[in-house]
Amino acid sequence: MTLDYDDLLNSIMASLDRTKQVEVNDIPNIDLYMDQLLTFMEENLRKSARHPGVDKILTKTMINNYAKNDLLPPPIKKKYSKDHIILLIYIYYYKNILSFSDIQTLFEPLYKRFGNDDAEINLKDIYTTIYDAQDEIIAHLKEDIKEKYGRAQESFPEAKGEDKDELQMLTFISMLSYDVFIKMLLIENIIDHIQEERGDTNKKKKKK
């Protein structure tokens, strides 16, 4: 069976448009109990799940583990604030590519220095800034995907039928995978650098 490359590419582009972050104004301004929090996360993030309706976006056990690993501050009177939700959204995106230790490195200044509405820059400001950049990121990503897709279609011109389809799809997936691999290495190197810098800073503070 010959693949319809145009349909597949259109499907990929459409899926990118459906995976936008939750808009900051859609995050409740009132504190939520655990069940309300789980419902909100399920309703707003299920479209980015691999198997919507089957994959669990978030569970009570997950939230408790995040708190134990210092990724999330404890709830206040069993309620979760807008800041909690923002942190949980980022954990949802990060957890598939970063370890808890790496996420903890990124989150350390978030709720300790910026988790305060009175702060000059707060979590809502940070979330909004990153949210506003996503349209440009997705636009660049679409162009990159189209370029890789085109190169994959030009590969193995000597192959025929299903052999050609499978080899070209493997080429396309390999290009995407290598791109992800390199970016993961870059992120890990940056986080290692952050950890080293903080370690040096802490040592200097102790000497003083």
Image: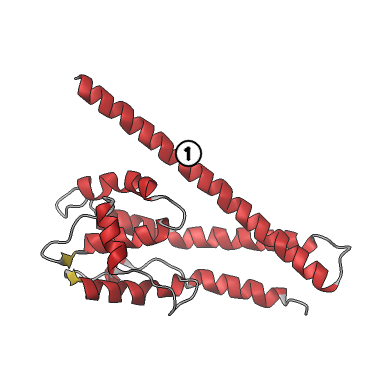
Q: Is residue 198 above or below residue 128?
A: above
Q: Position of residue 116 (x, y in %)?
A: 17, 52
The quadrant in which the N terminus is found is bottom right
Query: Would you identify the image quadrant in which residue 160 lies?
Result: bottom right
SS state under label 1: helix
Residue found at the very far top of the displayed protein: 207
The residue wearing badge 1 is 189
Query: Would you identify the image quadrant in which residue 195 lies?
Result: top left
Residue found at the very far right of the displayed protein: 158
Q: Position of residue 81 (x, y in %)?
A: 19, 64
Depth check: 57 or 15 in front?
A: 57
Depth check: 144 or 66 in front?
A: 66
Q: Is residue 63 above or below residue 185?
A: below
Q: Position of residue 106 (x, y in %)?
A: 34, 46
Q: From where the camera sits, is residue 147 visible?
A: no
Q: Is residue 120 left or right of residue 161?
A: left
The quadrant in which the C terminus is found is top left
Q: From where the camera sits, is residue 122 visible?
A: yes
**Which three-letter amino acid code belongs to the residue tagged 1?**
Asn
Q: Residue at x 22, y 25 (%)?
A: 205
Q: Position of residue 170 (x, y in %)?
A: 71, 62
